[in-house]
């Protein structure tokens, strides 16, 4: 066991559904532990790790039959004192020896809009339909590149927590993150896969959004010099909404998986 003292701290659960239709749950968890055993990445380092994990599950009759989990693997590797890029390249080039073959990404069909212009969704000033609100935000900011919409939907004191230990405070830091992702993947196309929520207009909402994206790495940015490789990105976002504004956001995405796709030797 790589982390014999591993602990999982349940931070939040967002749920919807019922016994007949199945329960949909989004679990935000903090995982911590000390690396005193061998892992698939290295020999024991003796270092402590703390990472974000978000798991979206569908369950019926007390059994989970469908699950999407995003671990902040890049943060864990970094905290172990390892070079994230070097580990990503090594794992990618030895993928045949693991549970996924080199073509595992082809099992997931592309569900993007092709050459069509991204549809336009008006972002409402007042939330009357959470699903439409979420679709409008992701499409307007990420697909239509309207970065000024961040001022409309996020509170002035927004706190963002994301993969690889990212913490952003305020709209400008959040906007810089979004722009950096688009700079790295200029043709990024994002698709919202699933949305559910709890709450009401008076007390606010807790929202879970699962999404996926495809883009070619053609720009300089946090992922290094452009490789030209097409990359699959997927993640889960949770929002705390108060007074029709997003006050807190947690987003976990497959950053280590992105590096594997970009740095692995093409076959």
Image (tube, rainbow, N blue to C red):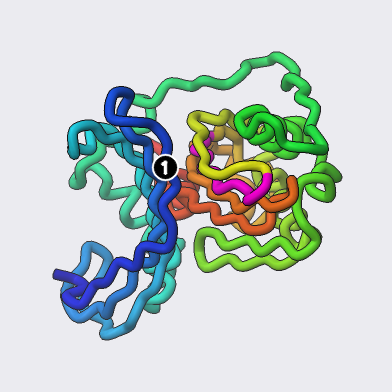
What's drawn in magenta, residue-wise? 202-212
In the image, is 148 to the left or to the right of 114? right
Which class describes the residues within 10 Å of circle 1: few (<14), some (14-19), or many (20+)? many
Q: Is the magenta stretch mostly helix, strand or loop?
A: strand
The picture quadrant where one finds residue 107 is top left
Q: Is residue 39 above or below residue 151?
A: below
Q: Residue at x 18, y 46 (%)?
A: 97
Residue on which disc 1 sits: 15
- In the rendered image, residue 221, in percent from the top left (x then y), is placed at 67, 55
- In the rendered image, residue 257, in percent from the top left (x then y), is placed at 42, 48
Q: Which residue is drawn at 79% across and 48% down?
A: 150
Residue 207 colored in magenta in the image: yes
Q: Is residue 204 above or below residue 73?
A: above
Residue sitting at the far bottom: 46
- In the rendered image, residue 178, in percent from the top left (x then y), is placed at 70, 50
Residue sitting at the far left: 1
Q: Which residue is drawn at 60% across and 55% down?
A: 249
Indicate the quadrant containing the N terminus: top left, top right, bottom left or bottom right.
bottom left
The picture quadrant where one finds residue 266 is top left
Indicate the quadrant containing the C terminus: top left, top right, bottom left or bottom right.
top left
């Amino acid at each position: 066991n790589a982390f014999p003292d591993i602990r999982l701290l349940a931070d939040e659960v967002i749920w919807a559904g019922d016994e007949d239709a199945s329960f949909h749950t989004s679990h935000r968890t903090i995982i911590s532990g000390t690396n005193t055993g061998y892992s698939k990445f290295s020999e024991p380092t003796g270092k402590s790790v703390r990472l974000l994990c978000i798991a979206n599950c569908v369950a019926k009759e007390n059994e989970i039959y469908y699950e999407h989990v995003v671990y902040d693997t890049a943060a864990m590797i970094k905290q172990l004192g390892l070079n994230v890029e070097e580990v990503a390249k090594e794992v990618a080039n030895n993928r045949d020896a693991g549970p996924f073959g080199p073509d595992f990404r082809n099992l997931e069909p592309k569900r993007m809009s092709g050459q069509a212009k991204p549809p336009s969704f008006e972002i409402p000033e007042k939330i009357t339909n959470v699903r439409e609100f979420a679709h409008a935000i992701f499409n307007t900011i990420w697909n239509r590149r309207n970065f000024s919409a961040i001022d409309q939907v996020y509170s002035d004191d927004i706190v963002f927590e994301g993969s690889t230990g990212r913490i952003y405070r305020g709209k400008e830091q959040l906007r810089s993150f979004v722009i950096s992702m688009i700079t790295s993947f200029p043709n990024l196309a994002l698709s919202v896969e699933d949305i559910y929520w709890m709450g009401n207009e008076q007390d606010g909402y807790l929202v879970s959004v699962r999404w996926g994206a495809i883009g070619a790495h053609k720009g300089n940015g946090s992922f290094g010099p452009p490789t030209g490789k097409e990359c699959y990105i997927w993640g889960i976002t949770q929002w705390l909404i108060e007074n029709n504004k997003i006050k807190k956001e947690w987003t976990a995405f497959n950053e280590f998986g992105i590096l594997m796709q970009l740095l692995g030797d093409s076959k």
